[in-house]
Each structure stands twice: as structure tokens, then as C-alpha cells.
């Protein structure tokens, strides 16, 4: 058991300032003095060191140097996981699923396990297992899992490709307000994938995602206004949404916005800039739509 736990113990990159204390903990751990290891690692963990947080999770999970306490193990694994520690994220997901220290069948943990399998983080990459975990979380109403499941059906990863099912899952997530799903649903309506083509519905879903600051949706909404697809053609609103998409990091939107200025009158440009400021000040709620 000790060898198995030693192999599972997580050792990460350490700064010189903490390496000595961490090494003292490792020496104590190797000698079987788990209480001393705990004493060395706890201050590091409490100061935010993810590796030490993970290791405290191991000690509490296995009852080494402390009474076994799954709830405390979960708490330490969670703190490490929130800093991006892949091993902690994986173990935390398993503990949620098994109901150790937390409520069983937690949708967020199932979604996180789906991500691990989709991306091969801490486990062998497996689209089918990713889909299975996304599905469990999605059925419990997790919007991110529903959107991810939509992607898997749209691309045929881990499941047979099925645009209609992709639309169904995107819709469930979009109706909960998830911007990425609203954008994806807009794409499906724009191109008629899994649903009859409907530019007005596409523009409406792009708009909902754009109002949440999603640059890709803001760009597409700008295109719809520029071409008059699903909305009346409007160069001022085109400029506004390209401008916001550019502000949020879309370089192609910056290019399109600059090109728009060559097709607009000085009055239109002035109006567009004023509307963009109004849109900003209202947190996308008063963008002239």
C-alpha cells in the first residue's frame, strides 16, 4: 500500500523558497512519518501551493498521519484543482462520482471527467468515455456539459454524427443562457444543419451570445447586419458589432470595421461610435437593436 501511495503522490515544480520545506515533507513521507509530512506541507498548502494541496488531499483521503476524512481530502483536492492541477481535477471528479466526501453524481464533477477524457488529461484520451460523462452531467442540467455534448454529436466524436441531436443539446444549453451554445445554435440555424435554415433565428441567437460579450457571436452578428441576413441591412449596427468584436480580440472584426468606414458617411460613423459607447455603458443592453 505504501509503495502504491508513494507512486501516486504528486510532486510538481517548486520555487527555491519552498523547495526545502517541501523536501522535508517528502523525507518524512518516505520514512513513514506522515504527521511530520503533514506539518511541513500544510503551511505551503495554506499559502496556495497546488502541489502541497494535492498531497494533503492524499494524506486525508488515505488516513495517513490524520484520521481518514474524505471531506477534507475533497477540500484540498478542490483547491489544487482550481489552480489547474490536472491530477487533482481527475481525483476530485472520481470522488464526486463515488460520493466520497461529497454528494454522489455531482454534475460538475461528471463534466470535468468528460473534459479529462476528451483532452486526455491524466487519462488516456477517449471520446466515447467523454461523451458518457458529458451525457450524465447534461441529463442533470449542466449547461456546459450539454453544449459539449452538442459539439460531440455535431463532429461525430465518440458518437455517430447527428446534427439534429447536436441542435437539441445546444438548445438546452442556450436556453440556460450559455453564450457558447447560443452561438453554436446560431450557426446551425444559419447553415441549416439539423434544423431548417433560418437566418432570423440565427441572428437572434447570435444576438443573445453577443450581448454576453462573445466575440465570435459579435462578429457574426455584424456580418448579418452588413449583408441583411435575418435582419434589416444596417451599416451603423454592423460597425457597432464589428467594433465590439474587435475590442474583445477579433482581428478579422477589426479589419472589417475599418473597411466599413470607407463605405459609411461621416454622419454614420459618428452615429456608430456614439452607439458603440452607449452599448458599452449599458453592458450590451442598449445597442440599438
Image (cartoon, rainbow, N blue to C red):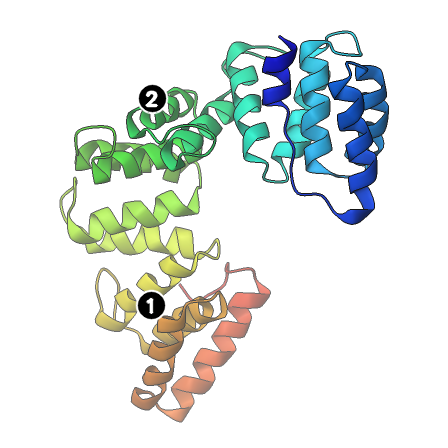
Q: Is residue 287 left or right of residue 78?
A: left
Residue in the picture at 79% in, 27% down: 25
Residue 102, visible in the rendered structure: no
Task: Give the labeled residue for mark 2.
Answer: 132
Residue 235, above or below 102: below
Res 39 quadrant in image: top right
Residue in the picture at 63% in, 16% down: 5
Q: Please state the horizontal and vertical placement of residue 170, each as a whole percent of the image.
A: 32, 37
- What separation in Å lies between label 2 and label 1 (alpha carbons)? 37 Å
Residue in the picture at 59% in, 21% down: 7
Label 2 element class: helix
Q: Please state the horizontal and vertical placement of residue 47, each as a whole percent of the image.
A: 81, 39
Residue 222 disc label:
1
> First in sequence: mark 2 or mark 1?
2
Mark 2 against mark 1, which lies toward the viewer?
2
Label 2, residues with CA under 10 Å away: few <14, some 14-19, many ≥20: some
Amino acid at each position: 500500500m505504501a509503495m502504491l501511495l508513494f507512486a501516486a503522490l504528486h510532486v510538481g515544480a517548486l520555487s527555491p523558497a519552498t523547495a526545502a520545506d517541501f523536501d522535508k515533507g517528502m523525507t518524512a513521507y518516505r520514512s513513514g512519518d506522515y504527521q511530520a509530512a503533514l506539518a511541513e506541507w500544510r503551511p505551503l498548502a495554506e499559502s496556495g501551493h497546488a502541489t502541497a494541496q494535492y498531497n494533503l488531499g492524499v494524506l486525508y483521503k488515505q488516513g495517513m498521519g490524520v484520521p481518514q476524512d474524505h471531506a477534507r481530502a475533497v477540500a484540498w483536492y478542490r483547491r489544487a484543482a482550481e489552480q489547474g492541477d490536472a491530477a487533482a481535477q481527475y481525483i476530485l471528479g472520481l470522488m464526486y462520482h463515488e460520493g466520497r466526501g461529497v454528494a454522489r453524481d455531482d454534475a460538475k464533477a461528471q463534466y470535468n471527467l468528460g473534459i479529462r477524457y476528451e483532452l486526455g488529461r491524466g487519462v488516456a484520451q477517449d471520446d466515447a468515455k467523454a461523451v458518457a460523462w458529458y451525457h450524465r452531467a447534461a441529463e442533470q442540467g449542466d449547461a456546459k456539459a450539454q453544449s459539449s455534448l452538442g459539439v460531440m454529436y455535431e463532429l461525430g466524436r465518440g458518437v455517430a454524427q447527428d446534427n439534429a441531436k447536436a441542435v437539441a443539446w445546444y438548445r438546452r444549453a442556450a436556453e440556460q443562457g450559455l453564450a457558447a451554445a447560443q452561438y453554436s445554435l446560431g450557426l446551425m440555424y444559419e447553415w441549416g444543419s439539423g434544423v431548417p435554415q433560418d437566418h432570423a433565428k440565427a441572428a437572434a441567437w447570435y444576438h443573445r451570445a453577443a450581448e454576453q460579450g462573445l466575440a465570435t457571436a459579435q462578429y457574426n452578428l455584424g456580418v448579418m447586419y452588413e449583408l441583411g441576413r435575418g435582419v434589416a441591412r444596417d451599416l451603423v449596427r454592423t460597425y457597432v458589432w464589428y467594433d465590439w468584436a474587435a475590442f474583445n480580440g477579433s482581428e478579422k472584426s477589426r479589419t472589417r470595421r475599418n473597411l466599413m468606414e470607407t463605405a459609411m458617411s461621416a454622419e454614420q460613423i459618428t452615429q456608430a461610435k456614439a452607439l458603440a459607447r452607449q452599448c458599452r455603458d449599458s453592458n450590451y443592453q442598449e445597442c440599438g437593436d
